[in-house]
Amino acid sequence: MLKEALAELVRGLGFDCYAYVNLQPVRTYAVSNYPSEWQARYLLQKYTKVDPVVSMARARMQAFAWAAEHAHKSADKRVRRFFHEAGDFGIKSGVIGIWAYVYADASIE
């Protein structure tokens, strides 16, 4: 149900693919419709530690757009390799939305 809703949402925004990532200090949870080969490579190479988009999302905690067009200028060769490989799968830009859920006790005494 979540995958279908996310696919419909991103198509409405003009995108083909999505990655929903829940970043937690201990564990990261992700749902994506990126090609399965890319998802496997991303996990195998532990790209959550290299992916600058993930780092920016953690630091900013607000929505932003990103593009890999200047990635070749990165001083870090791991970042350059990451964006090159992502580009091989057609992943070159995107929009990051940050959603935070706050749970509170709504009971009134």
Image: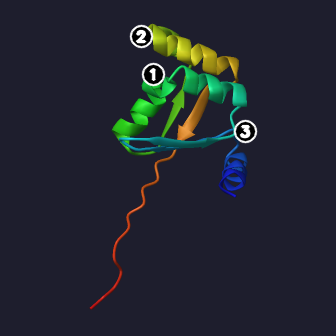
Residue 91 appears in view = no
**Disc 1/disc 3 C-alpha distance (Å):** 24 Å
Residue at x-position 42% and y-position 38% = 57
Vertical position of residue 92 compared to residue 26: above or below: above
N-terminal of the pair, mark 3 or mark 2, is 3
Location of residue 90 (image quadrant) = top right
Residue closer to the observer: 13 or 44 = 44
Residue 101 appears in view = yes
Residue 60 as seen in the image, left or right of residue 44: left
What kind of residue is marked 2? Asp
Q: Which quadrant: the N terminus?
A: bottom right
Circle 2 is placed at which residue position? 76
Asked if marks 1 and 3 touch (Cβ < 8 Å), the reply is no
Q: Which mark is residue 70?
A: none
**Disc 2/disc 1 C-alpha distance (Å):** 9 Å
Q: Secondary structure at mark 2?
A: loop
Residue closer to the observer: 63 or 40 = 40
Residue mark closest to the camera, 2 vs 1: 1
**Disc 3/disc 2 C-alpha distance (Å):** 29 Å
Q: Which quadrant: the C terminus?
A: bottom left
Q: Residue furthest bottom?
A: 109
* Residue 89 spot, x, y in % from top left: 70, 22
* Residue 92 spot, x, y in % from top left: 62, 25
What kind of residue is marked 3? Asp
Circle 3 is placed at which residue position? 16
Residue closer to the observer: 20 or 70 = 20
N-terminal of the pair, mark 1 or mark 3, is 3
Circle 1 is placed at which residue position? 50
What kind of residue is marked 1? Val
Asked if marks 2 and 1 touch (Cβ < 8 Å), the reply is yes
Residue 89 as seen in the image, left or right of residue 66: right
